Image: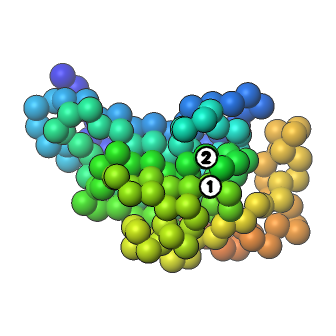
Amino acid sequence: PQVAEDITISNNVFTSSQKISAFVRILTADSGNKATGHVTIVGNTMSAPLNDNKAAIAIDNNSTSQVELFDVRNNIITGIGSETVFKAKFVPSDWTSNFNVIDPNGSFRWGSNGASNLGAWRTLSGEAASSLACVPNFVNANGGDFHLDGTSGCALDNGVNVASISAIDQAPK
């Protein structure tokens, strides 16, 4: 079996007018070995309604082999309503999540524990100190323009410099 070592998901716009199940879903399969890869989800805009009981970023495992290293930064996750922002069926040993703009109505799932808002998520995960719960203003989301407009104070200039992050093609982003 093939095992992906490192995965970077960056600089994407995920959107739909229809309900979806997840923007990003990491499913670890049973390879017989402990997964050693690092999953980086950075600089994405995710805006769409979610199906009931689904998550914007879902981390599932159906085996004893699970990815333990996650870095989730500088993402905008909005339009999901009261559904789950992050859902991890297990608690990764190395999880970094910060500088994200989160739908204020979203909830969180961390192993067998839940959090109803960003403040409770911070307490539960020990992460997201600089993340914000707000609804950003886009130039024209209905027309597909997800640039932040000049009035979007909750998201403008609130991230971290991602100049040092390279995508799979190794080009700086």
* Vertical position of residue 121 compared to residue 1: above or below: below
Q: Is residue 64 left or right of residue 141?
A: left
| Disc 1 + disc 2, Cβ < 8 Å | yes
Q: Position of residue 101 (x, y in %)?
A: 64, 63
Around disc 1, counting alpha carbons within 10 Å, would you say few (fewer than 14), some (14 to 19), or many (20 or more)?
many
- Amino acid found under the numbered disc labelled 2: Glu
| Mark 2, residue position | 83
Q: Is residue 165 visible?
A: no
> Which quarter of the rendering shows the C terminus?
bottom right
Residue 70 falls in image quadrant? bottom left
Q: Is residue 18 visible?
A: yes
Which residue is located at x 61 percent, y 46 percent?
A: 83
Q: Position of residue 145 (x, y in %)?
A: 83, 45
- Amino acid found under the numbered disc labelled 1: Gly
* Vertical position of residue 134 compared to residue 49: above or below: below
In front of the other: 137 or 103: 103
* Vertical position of residue 102 compared to residue 55: above or below: below
Which residue is located at x 78 percent, y 48 percent?
A: 146
In front of the other: 79 or 26: 79
Indicate which disc, 1 or 2, sits on the residue closer to the N terminus: 2
* Vertical position of residue 137 compared to residue 8: above or below: below
Q: Is residue 111 left or right of residue 142?
A: left
Which residue is located at x 50 percent, y 45 percent?
A: 57
Q: Position of residue 93 (x, y in %)?
A: 25, 60
Count of numbered circles in the view: 2
| Mark 1, residue position | 106
